[in-house]
Amino acid sequence: MIRKLAFRSLMAEKFRCVCTIIAMILTALLFSTLFTTAAGLNSANDYYEFKKLGTTAHVVVKEWDKDFAKVDAIRENANVDKVGCRRFFGYAVNPELNYNVEISFMDEAESSLDYYTPTGGKMPAEVNEVAMDTTTMAALGIPQEVGAPVDIDMEVNGEVVTESFVLAGWFDINKAYPVKVGQIMTSDKYGDAWDSKFESGTVYGKCDIAILLKDAYDIEGQTEEIFNEVGLEFSQDMISVNPGYNVSSEAISSETLVMLVSGILVIVLIGYLIINNIFYISARKDAKQFGRLKTIGMSNKHLAAFVRYQAFIMLSIAVPLGIAGGYFMGRLILPAILRQTAYDSVADDTVISAGVIVLILAGAALFVVITTLISVNGPIRMIKKLSPIESTRIELKGYKKTRKSNDGSRADKFAKYNIMRNKKSFAMLLVSISLPMLLVIVSYDAFSSFDMDKYLSSMLVTDYTFATSDYYKNDYIDRENNVKALDSAIVEEIKNSGFVEDGSLIYGDIANEYASVKEIDLPEGEEYALDLYGTEEFTLNDSLIIEDNIDMEAFNNGTGIVEGCWLTSDGEIYPGTSRFETGDTVNITGSDGKERSYTVLGHINVALGAMKTGITKGSFACELYMNTKQYEEITGNQKIMSYSFNVKKGMEEDAESFIKGIVKADNTLNYQSKYSLAEDFASMKLLVKLISLLLCGVLTFIAIMNLINVFVSSIMVRQKEIATLKSIGMTRGQLRTMLMWEIFYYNGIAFAIAVVLSLIFSPTVFKSIFNEFPFLTFHVNWFSYPSIILVIMFVGIMTVLFVENRISKMNIPEELKTV
């Protein structure tokens, strides 16, 4: 009976019901859209980084030469999720191909780990079947048809042989990979045919085993445990850990944590106020109805059930619509954002899993339900406290004293008295409008705070660094200590180009085999990486050096060295990355057997610039920098790790074209420049701009709809009062003016609150948080203030005209009967 009465009561108040459902939909839409998009962007970043690395496997065991039965044992281990196998056969060198195309066998697990799952056809199974990427197929003129002939000129150990296959399947090329690399996959059966024709070489015919663990905690420790359990010897040299999982254990900074928590709480509060305002007004409007129900014997328990049934009826409509709308908005917005950024290569991929989406949508739905249940408790408590007689007399006013005034007929005064009738409702509405305004202001401030110079200085200390491609893949020195040095002839070509203003070579080598540091004394069995570098004062930029005023004269004359270390986000030396204090004496024995003494002059941040080998092993890496002469004396070599240089003013574009030409002609070379990083910065800035616009758009829409919803609802429940005023002579013009003043008060006071809060927090909290990011320097965007007030005032005026026109269509006797 109560359910039927609750449903019929809603149907009798269709307008109020629609307003409440809209409030619920907006809350669900707010959470599902923002969190789906935010989670999608975060997943896109992780997905892009892994795809750029070429695999999602935690560990790759290089050159597997053990019993393949052990692979099955590893696969069955409780800590292992998936194991893939890849055997490299050679390169496709057809004349139509101007990029590297690798030919290899991959099992199904490996192809999925490396992003080569066929999108058409199937995995190759027969000896003459292959699957290949669509880019290489297009270059060779092969149609996307199963069974199409494929002739490949395969290079193995310098020998080129033409092999004939048929097409079994195809997949997309990995566009996120830094260097364009095509892939041709053969079947496992082809391995026997290959063995009958070729001999295994340095890399040809070798197998790699990729292991995906069930979690990324202590990857090396888990791998060692797995090897021990299956009866294999383990050493760090035999495995390669995916750097995508090397997430710093450093805790999030307190400022960032406060910002995140505050932002979430504000959004939660906005969602709560959207629903609560409507229910509060509705409860006061229906107080007389509740009084009549009490009069005929309905208990407080029944009334509470009555209100909750109404809430659940509206939730059953609002939640699916809001969640579905948020899901589709997120799915539409996310690819559009990614296509405008550096992540465009993964824009069409599924970057966020269905499980994560379900959790987000379930969380948004749960929040709306909980918020609604909390929101109805206040009106229920109010109803329970009223006696049947009081309930029938209650009106929408909050004051109890008689007001005396000699100018109460003025529209502005009348409007002020109207909005101040119930101070609690007035305060809640102001908060629900001002908070979205504040977030919009902060979003505009974030966008105007981008600082390209700060970003570039945090990424690169010179205009250009030039090195081998292996260097930028953290493979400058491989596990056999082979150095992928830069050819001095390339450096001379750059120097003689006419673009270089100043520059310096950076030599680098892992010197454990021929050099040692006397002051490093480790327990037996433990080891470390001794990375030695030779450079000049030019590369030791002030932004690299941690200490102030180090003695560069001692560095130049060969009596002093600098130690490399890593810094935390607070600018402190990361524990375990530095072995020496400034002023310490370090004795280094070189390749010639001589011991040389140096004074530690200071420390540099190796995270900046092309200033590190990327090699660590054992307990730690000792990074020591000296001038080029001392480096040559200690190491006995001139292995060029990179070349850093600045470009003459006005020649930046010509230099960029020149360097690009060198790299395009030789894909074993690569570079970083402030010019290319500026393009990345512009892409990142555009990404944040799109996110800010999305946030501003959603929040502005929420604030406007909340204002319209509450204002329209409050007007509709005052129809009898307005009809009374009209019956004693109030004209449409006077009514419109009064309503205009009401909306101006709401908007003006809410805007003033948002401005005051922004001006209080901007130079303090927001400034310190923004400046913590390496690409932001806080600036106030003053343009946002007039933009916001103009938008909300325009919407307010349109709302008043709509409402006034609606209520003026009814004649006075009809309006007096509405309540």
Image (cartoon, rainbow, N blue to C red):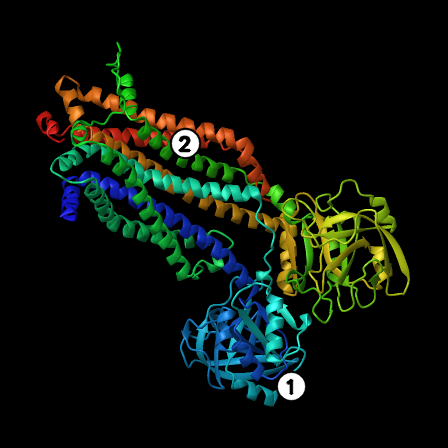
- Label for residue 787? 2
Counting from the top left corner in percent of width and height, residue 193 is at 55, 88
Q: Label 1: few (<14), some or many (≥20) within 10 Å?
A: few
> Who comes first in sequence, dot 2 or dot 1?
1
- The residue tagged 1 is 199
Q: Is residue 741 left or right of residue 393?
A: right
For the residue marked with disc 1, what is the amino acid?
Glu
Q: Is residue 523 left or right of residue 124?
A: right
Vertical placement of 324 versus 267: above or below? below
Q: Nearer the viewer, residue 28 or 548?
A: 28
Q: Is residue 703 left or right of residue 676?
A: left
Label 2 to label 1: alpha-carbon separation? 72 Å
| Residue 493 in sight | no
Q: Nearer the viewer, residue 395 or 112?
A: 395
For the residue marked with disc 2, what is the amino acid?
Ser
**Helix, strand, or loop for circle 2?**
helix
Q: Residue at x 29, y 28 (%)?
A: 797
Farthest bottom residue in view: 196
Q: Label 2: few (<14), some or many (≥20) within 10 Å?
A: few
Vertical placement of 617 versus 540: above or below? below
Q: Nearer the viewer, residue 696 or 712?
A: 712
Farthest right residue in view: 594
Counting from the top left corner in percent of width and height, residue 566 is at 69, 52
Q: Residue at x 51, y 70 (%)?
A: 113
Q: Nearer the viewer, residue 202 or 592?
A: 592
Q: Is residue 397 left or right of residue 3?
A: right
Vertical placement of 144 versus 722: above or below? below
**Helix, strand, or loop for circle 1?**
loop
Given contact means CB atoms under 8 Å apart, are the residues at marks 2 and 1 in contact? no
Vertical placement of 303 versus 199: above or below? above
